[in-house]
């Protein structure tokens, strides 16, 4: 399972008892490795030390309702889903790209064995390898909220390693603009879209509410 273009070769391999994504720069002959480790500082910092600052949690809350279900229609490497799951939201994660799906699935399986976080990982992070539009049409899950994060397509500055790999793997595979209207129809309560502050509304559709952060905003569409 290999992704190749003129500059890079990207593939999966098993290393140190975990699935890793390997990127080889064909010109510089340089290798980089990436794995999904929900026990690492990068993932855990938001869960442990950034609780009161997580705007995404405020965006997902529903007044007077507990046991909220969410479809993360653009799961990627699972960072937002992990934070949401750690706060008690049940997250159905949809990832179309088979390479990213396998990498994410391996990370979830390893984390589910951990004594500290394994219990709620198993309960609150459910992963599907599917196209989100098809998933919506089949109505496999009818959630309270649908979350769309198409933000990595737009940023022009040099991305971090994980974001760069996402861009390469998902190039020409993105259909987030087509997700908004079907998502609004399917979700019981609302759809939340993550955007950079200066980005236009998804599908040019004005949201009912907006929550602003320092770098990002959350556009909220109610039923």
Image (cartoon, rainbow, N blue to C red):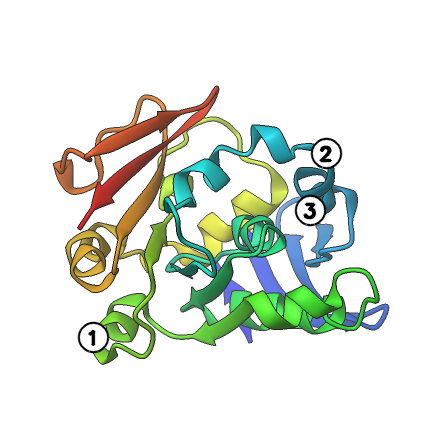
> Which sits in the foreground, 176 or 145?
145
- Label 1: which secondary element: helix
| Mark linked to residue 93 | none
- Marks 2 and 1, the one that precedes in the sequence: 2
- Label 2: which secondary element: helix
The quadrant in which residue 212 appears is top left
> Which sits in the foreground, 223 or 202?
223
What's the CA distance linking mark 2 and mark 1?
38 Å
On the rendered structure, is 73 left or right of 203? right
Taking the view exactly as shown, the residue that stands out farthest to the front is 64
**Residue, disc 1:** 137
The residue sitting at 58% across, 28% down in the picture is 53
What's the CA distance linking mark 3 and mark 1?
32 Å
Can residue 12 be seen here?
A: no
In the rendered view, would you say 124 is above or below 139? above
The quadrant in which residue 123 appears is bottom right
> Which sits in the foreground, 218 or 60?
60
Label 3 close to label 1 by CB (< 8 Å): no
On the rendered structure, is 29 left or right of 215? right
The residue sitting at 45% across, 67% down in the picture is 92
| Mark linked to residue 43 | 3
Can residue 209 be seen here?
A: yes
Residue 155 image position (x, y, % from top left): 41, 31
In the rendered view, would you say 24 is above or below 198? below
- Label 3: which secondary element: helix
- Are there few (<14), some (14-19), or many (20+) residues within 10 Å of tag 3? some
- Marks 3 and 1, the one that precedes in the sequence: 3
Residue 82 image position (x, y, % from top left): 60, 54
**Residue, disc 2:** 49
In the rendered view, would you say 3 is above or below 160? below
């Amino acid at each position: 399972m290999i992704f190749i273009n003129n500059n890079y070769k990207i593939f999966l391999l098993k290393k140190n008892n975990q699935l890793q994504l390997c990127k080889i720069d064909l010109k510089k002959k340089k290798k980089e490795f990436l794995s999904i480790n929900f026990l690492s500082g990068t993932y855990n910092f938001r869960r442990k030390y950034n609780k009161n600052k997580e705007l995404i949690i405020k965006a997902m809350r529903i007044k007077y309702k507990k046991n909220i279900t969410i479809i993360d229609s653009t799961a990627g490497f699972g960072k937002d889903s992990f934070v949401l799951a750690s706060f008690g939201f049940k997250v159905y994660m949809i990832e179309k790209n088979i390479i990213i799906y396998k990498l994410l699935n391996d990370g979830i399986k390893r984390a589910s064995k951990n004594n500290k976080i394994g219990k709620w990982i198993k309960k609150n992070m459910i992963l599907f390898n599917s196209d989100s539009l098809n998933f919506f049409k089949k109505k496999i899950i009818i959630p309270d909220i649908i979350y769309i994060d198409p933000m990595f397509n737009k940023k022009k500055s040099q991305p971090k390693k994980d974001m760069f790999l996402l861009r390469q793997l998902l190039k020409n595979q993105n259909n987030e603009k087509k997700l908004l209207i079907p998502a609004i129809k399917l979700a019981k309560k609302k759809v939340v879209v993550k955007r950079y502050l200066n980005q236009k509304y998804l599908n040019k559709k004005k949201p009912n509410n907006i929550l602003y952060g320092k770098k990002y905003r959350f556009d909220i569409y109610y039923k």
